[in-house]
Image: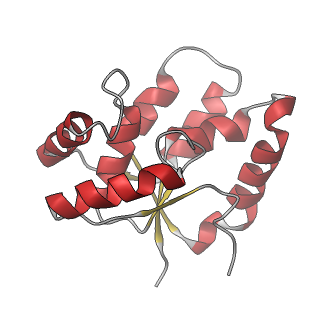
Amino acid sequence: MKKSVYLDTTIFSYYVDERSILQVHIDRTKEWWTNERNLYELYISVPTIVELQEGKFKGQEEALNLAKSINLLHVDPEINNIINVYIKNQLMPSNDVGDALHLAYSSFYKIDVLLTWNCRHLANVNKKGHIRSINQSLGLFIPEITTPLELRRE
């Protein structure tokens, strides 16, 4: 059985990014997308699509097309309750709920891996203990949170 992987917005935005300072991450994202994504059952949420639709950026249409090819998780009212607990416990910032949304979706739907380039609020070893503690107190699944650098073909 394939592992399930939730893709946050950064995966799609890095795929179309052209900044030289991010070249290693861009190259790994494209390599993973081309050679390894089919090894997993992939999921996104409506907030992923909404985040990709916001503003204007080069490659936006391509990023949206990639995202729209992925299984979409349904909105569930319980996810808002989870997000509120994350924010109340200062797990995620209150001024930008995007990271809390991605974690809540992957936890609620018991997705094996949350794939992200967000190393500040998600793929951060200093945050993982806090995430584990909060999810355990809520009786939620604890997804593995990692970047494409670490999610490699076995």
Viewer can see residue 108: no
Q: Indicate whether 124 appears above or below 12.
A: below
Residue 89 lies in quadrant: top left
Image point 38% across, 45% down: which residue?
102
Q: How many marks?
A: 0
Place residue 33 in its image quadrant: bottom right
Residue that extends furthest to the top in the rendered view of this protein: 55
**Residue 57 vs residue 27: left or right?**
left
Outermost residue on the right side: it is 20
Q: Residue at x 81, y 48 (%)?
A: 27
Q: Is residue 111 left or right of residue 38?
A: left
Does residue 72 appear in the picture of this structure? yes
Left or right, 79 with respect to 68, comes to left
Residue 70 screen position, x and y as percent? 48, 53
Q: Position of residue 11 (x, y in %)?
A: 60, 45
Q: Residue at 47%, 47% (x, y): give it.
A: 122
Who is closer to the viewer here, 91 or 57? 91
Location of residue 91 with respect to 136 vertically, above or below: above
Residue at 75% x, 51% y: name it. Answer: 30
Q: Quadrant of the C terminus?
A: bottom right
> Can you say whether 24 is above or below 2 in the image?
above
Could you tell whether 33 is left or right of 146 in the image? right
Q: Position of residue 118 (x, y in %)?
A: 56, 41
Please name the colour scheme applied to the rendered image.
secondary structure
Q: Residue furthest bottom?
A: 1
Residue in the foreground of this view, choosing between 64 and 52: 52
Name above or below for residue 31 compared with residue 61. Answer: below
Name the quadrant containing residue 112. Answer: bottom left
**Picture coordinates of residue 108, whole percent (x, y):** 25, 57
From the viewer's side, name the closer residue of 43 and 88: 88
